[in-house]
Amino acid sequence: MDLTRLDLRGFSGSPADLRAVLPAPTDVQERSAEAVAGILADVRLRGDASLRELTVRFDGVDLDELRVPAAEVAAAPARIAPEVRAALVTAAERIADYHRHDLSPDPEPFVSGGVTVRGFWRPVERAGCYAPGGRARYPSTVLMCAVPARVAGVDEVVLCVPPGPDGRVDDVSLAAAAIAQVDAVFRVGGAQAIGAMAYGTESVPAVDVIVGPGNRFVAEAKRQVSGVVGVASAFAGPSEVVVVAGPSTPARLAAVDLVVQAEHGPDGLAWLVTWSEEVADEVDRLVAEIVETSPRRDDLAATLASGGYAVLVDGPAEAIAVSNVVAPEHLELLVEDAADLLGSVRSAGAVFLGPTSPASMGDYLAGPNHVLPTNRTARFASALRADDFRKHVHAVEVSEEALATLGPSVAVLADAEGLPAHAASVRWRVGR
């Protein structure tokens, strides 16, 4: 199979012109909105009964109990291979170390003219994490969502995971939940899981923040419940990558890294951007070879047929210009002196520098989060961070002198806005 070829060599238009000629992502929100709205309304109205019926419909399993027994979760680390357990612990420790580092200490108070403003952070009380299922299991996502919540000081962390055909959640995901100190695991997936965590059901408690990636229905559900709960990392939906390759880039590395993101399933995007036609041809050949021998051959072929592109440009600067328009979840700069291009990168969820820095490292063990903005929301959104589980609060303390000096101006402004009680609250204190 061939990636869809776009030849932009010699293109000299503006960024707006470039946006017009590059394929835009499918409007998954529009396609999913009506179906998701129906699911959310039903979950809100009927609670657990709706979750059970939807789990039968979408996951093919009829569950008596939605919550995974706590003893089963606690025992999961002992049921998995020791090397897998050790890798989960290593990943959890590295994720925690990074997110502790990422938490800035309380800033020094702001003091001006007798007014002191102290800023402080408070974690949310309950966080909801979503880990996808279906085509694959994602214990790494369990860690990426739950560990930063714990680092931020969240009191309670709950997790929703789609059940397998046998009605169970796999042991590796349960082990990750135990290692990350998740309080409760529920066998619920899809938009209905998002609805359950947003509104609460008889079994699933309502949360304050929902995090975690998912398919287009999960992403749309998060968009629709935003405002009922906090939703971090805008539109963390189907996976995306832009691989920037030069003439000396090993084609096999570029090819496999394109396939890596396509492994996550439908609606994903995999872009090769290069100024070497020879590299583009060789990557095409190798992608076809990798896909043909993969046990996920059919899924990979379908994803790459709809979302696989090879873009020819004039050089590195033009390659970054294309990437900035795509605003990918993952940007791999598989070129020499990759760090020199970093200053030109404006929109990307995460950037990976050089041939020895594959996005797979970011998926598991680099430390920063792999829950990243997709669907071009990297234009304004960022990776999931511990701060997404915290609220910033400020406390204002005004001295008598400052109130006497500044209060009259407050009263003047309040009068100008037609808010006499605002003015009186100051005037009564300063005797004017």
Image (tube, rainbow, N blue to C red):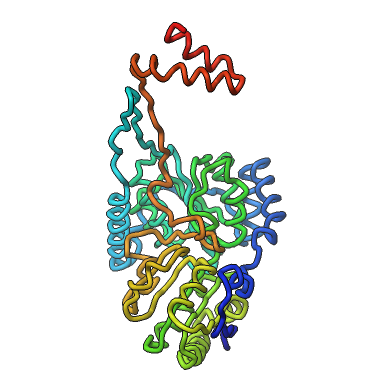
Q: Of 75 and 247, which appears nearest the observer?
A: 247
Is residue 213 placed above or below 2 in the rendered structure? above
Q: Residue at x 65, y 67 (%)?
A: 26
Q: Residue at x 35, y 46 (%)?
A: 150
Residue 98, picture quadrant: bottom left
Is residue 246 placed above or below 194 in the rendered structure? below
Answer whether residue 256 is visible to the viewer in this image. no
Q: Is residue 316 left or right of residue 88?
A: right
User: Looking at the rendering, in which quadrant would you find the N terminus?
Assistant: bottom right
Is residue 408 placed above or below 49 in the rendered structure? above
Residue 71 coordinates in the image, percent (x, y): 39, 49
Q: Of 393 and 218, which appears nearest the observer?
A: 393
Q: Residue at x 69, y 59 (%)?
A: 30
Residue 424 coordinates in the image, percent (x, y): 52, 12
Residue 188 coordinates in the image, percent (x, y): 55, 53
Q: Is residue 218 left or right of residue 76?
A: right
Answer whether residue 352 is visible to the viewer in this image. yes
Q: Residue at x 38, y 72 (%)?
A: 341
Q: Of 73 and 176, which appears nearest the observer?
A: 176
Q: Of 430 and 348, which appears nearest the observer?
A: 430
